[in-house]
Image: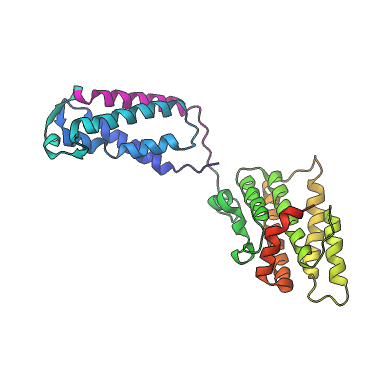
């Protein structure tokens, strides 16, 4: 998924409008024609290279780009250098008419294809900025804690944010819980639990045993175990049922809750191993996840 910068298209439209207006005359100095077209090629190149949903008009845009790139060296350059002498030569409309025809074709095809290209506007979700949800939703977790999370867990939170932004609330909850489970695995490894665990119930029981165990210091906080158990019974287990769905508000709340819970787990892990050791655990955990 690529974010389209609409300002680029706005500027391209302005430049093309200037080109059409400037060249809709019978005669003009070569330098004036150059001034009307010289900013257009890089804008056309970006339009053609963008993953923007346009297909047919990209071919026509390429034809306009070729016409401009052929006209410039032929009319205002000598040996690859701009020539002031050639720029002062008066030209007639037939000498740039090919560019105007390609411009007209591009505008017509672009207008027609706009009816088939889907462009969506995504509004702000709760307190989250749309750009952050789409590009890096894991920033909902403070940077000091993200540093000690695995890439896999961060990716799940990024995916959860994109789902939240594009109105896929159930998928948002699914990815947020997957990210939390990845951190849970790192969490227990930090406390020395190497046994393969398969369910949230097993994860939480293992954490509770550590929290209640004697001679274990530091130990998992009861706050974390309570948060995980609450999430298991009220969010994770119901969401696994095929008929259970989240609405946008519930997905946003679950996303926030998982981010807070993950931060609390990282706090506990730091107390055990220190932040650098935790980062090493997180980086190597994916190879042995259940």
Q: Is residue 279 above or below residue 287?
A: below
Q: Position of residue 53 (x, y in %)?
A: 50, 33
Q: Give the side of residue 17 with respect to residue 171, left or right.
A: left
Q: Residue at x 45, y 25 (%)?
A: 56
**Toward which corner of the image does residue 283 lie, by quadrant?**
bottom right
Question: How has the structure been colored for display?
Answer: rainbow
Depth check, front residue: 11 or 191: 191
**Is residue 97 in sight in this rendering?**
yes
Residue 146 percent coordinates (x, y): 63, 62
Q: Which residues are magenta?
A: 95-121
Identified at 77% across, 63% down, the residue is: 189
- Which one is in front, 272 or 262? 272
148 relative to 205 in the view: left or right: left
Answer above or below: position of 258 versus 91. below
Q: Position of residue 46 (x, y in %)?
A: 40, 39
Q: Is residue 110 magenta?
A: yes
The total number of labels drawn is: 0
Q: For the view shown, which residue lies furthest in the front direction?
A: 79
Left or right of residue 124: residue 196: right
Q: Does residue 197 lie above or below 92 as drawn?
A: below
Q: Is residue 60 magenta?
A: no
If the image is split into quadrants, where does the N terminus sit?
top right
Secondary structure mostly seen in the magenta stretch: helix
On the question of residue 107 being in view, the answer is no
**Image point 82% across, 61% down: which residue?**
194
Instruction: Name the foreground residue: 255 vs 48.
Output: 48
**Quarter residue 179 falls in:** bottom right
């Amino acid at each position: 998924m690529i974010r389209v910068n609409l300002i680029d298209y706005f500027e391209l439209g302005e430049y093309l409008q200037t080109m059409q207006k400037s060249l809709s005359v019978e005669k003009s100095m070569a330098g004036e024609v150059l001034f009307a077209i010289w900013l257009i090629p890089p804008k056309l190149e970006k339009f053609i290279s963008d993953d923007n949903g346009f297909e047919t008009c990209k071919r026509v845009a390429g034809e306009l780009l070729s016409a401009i790139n052929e006209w410039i060296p032929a009319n205002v350059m000598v040996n690859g250098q701009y020539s002031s002498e050639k720029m002062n030569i008066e030209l007639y409309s037939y000498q740039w008419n090919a560019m105007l025809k390609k411009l007209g074709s591009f505008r017509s095809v672009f207008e027609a294809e706009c009816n088939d290209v889907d462009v969506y506007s995504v509004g702000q979700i709760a307190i989250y900025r749309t750009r952050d949800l789409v590009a890096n939703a894991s920033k909902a977790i403070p940077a000091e804690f993200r540093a000690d999370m695995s890439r896999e867990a961060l990716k799940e939170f990024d995916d959860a944010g994109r789902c939240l932004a594009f109105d896929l609330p159930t998928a948002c909850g699914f990815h947020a819980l997957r990210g939390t489970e990845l951190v849970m695995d790192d969490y227990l490894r930090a406390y020395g639990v190497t046994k393969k665990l398969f369910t949230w119930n097993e994860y939480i029981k293992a954490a509770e045993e550590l929290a209640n165990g004697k001679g274990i210091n530091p130990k998992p906080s009861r706050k974390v175990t309570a948060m995980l158990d609450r999430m298991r019974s009220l969010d994770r287990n119901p969401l696994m049922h095929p008929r259970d769905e989240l609405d946008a508000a519930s997905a946003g709340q679950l996303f926030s809750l998982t981010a807070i819970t993950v931060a609390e787990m990282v706090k506990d892990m730091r107390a055990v191993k220190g932040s650098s050791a935790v980062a090493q655990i997180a980086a190597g955990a994916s190879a042995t996840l259940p």
